[in-house]
């Protein structure tokens, strides 16, 4: 994860310079200035997460300059290709975004749909008391 973490960590000062330059040249126009400063925070959060995660993980084949393609073979994680829950979460997010334009009552419906879909996705592989 060294490459990914370096990419995001090195982008933080770049976006900070861009945000400050934009703010100074636009007399701190509120939407763009705040958006760019939030972008700096987002990139910093992702970069710090990747740095911390990279320290806890064993080196991957991508991190080895002499790594071979065969080293990356095998299981890559748990993924259910038959799951419909990501579509339900995306629908809830779409309803929430629609609610920002139409009305807060639509946003509330989107929040409910999103929470139900998230709970369904989390308990999809549950084999205990709440199995379905």
Image: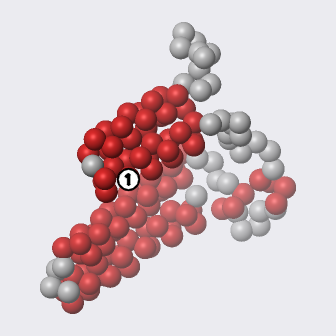
Could you say which is closer to the camera, residue 29 or residue 4? 29
The answer to whether residue 45 is left or right of residue 73 is left
The answer to whether residue 27 is left or right of residue 18 is left
The residue shown at (38%, 79%) is 14
Tell me where residue 6 appears, x and y as whole percent. Answer: 50, 68
- Dividing the picture into quadrants, the one containing residue 113 is top left
Is residue 122 in view from this perspective? no
Tell me where residue 19 appears, x and y as whole percent. Answer: 28, 78
Could you say which is closer to the camera, residue 6 or residue 42? 42
Quadrant (top left, top right, bottom left, bottom right) of the N terminus: bottom right
In this view, 98 is above or below 85: below
Residue located farthest toward the left when viewing the structure as drawn = 27
Quadrant (top left, top right, bottom left, bottom right) of the C terminus: top right
Residue located farthest toward the right when viewing the structure as drawn = 70
Instruction: Say few, some or many: other residues with alpha carbon within 10 Å of mark 1 (under 14 / 14 to 19 / 20 or more).
Output: some
Residue designated by label 1: 97
Tell me where residue 53 appears, x and y as whole percent. Answer: 51, 49
Residue located farthest toward the front when viewing the structure as drawn = 102
Residue located farthest toward the top when viewing the structure as drawn = 129
The residue shown at (47%, 34%) is 118
Tell me where residue 102 appears, x and y as whole percent. Answer: 31, 53
The answer to whether residue 86 is left or right of residue 76 is left
Is residue 19 in view from this perspective? yes
The residue shown at (57%, 36%) is 85
Label 1: which secondary element: helix
């Amino acid at each position: 994860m060294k490459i990914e973490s370096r990419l995001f960590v090195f982008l933080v000062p770049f976006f900070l310079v861009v945000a400050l330059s934009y703010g100074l040249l636009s007399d701190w126009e509120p939407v763009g200035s705040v958006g760019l400063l939030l972008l700096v925070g987002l990139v910093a959060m992702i970069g710090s997460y990747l740095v911390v995660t990279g320290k806890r993980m064993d080196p991957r084949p991508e991190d080895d300059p002499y790594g071979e393609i065969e080293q990356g073979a095998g299981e890559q994680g748990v993924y259910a290709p038959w799951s419909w829950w990501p579509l339900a979460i995306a629908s809830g997010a779409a309803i929430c975004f629609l609610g920002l334009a139409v009305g807060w009552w639509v946003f509330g419906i989107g929040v409910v749909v999103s929470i139900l879909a998230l709970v369904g996705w989390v308990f999809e592989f549950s084999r205990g008391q709440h199995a379905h």
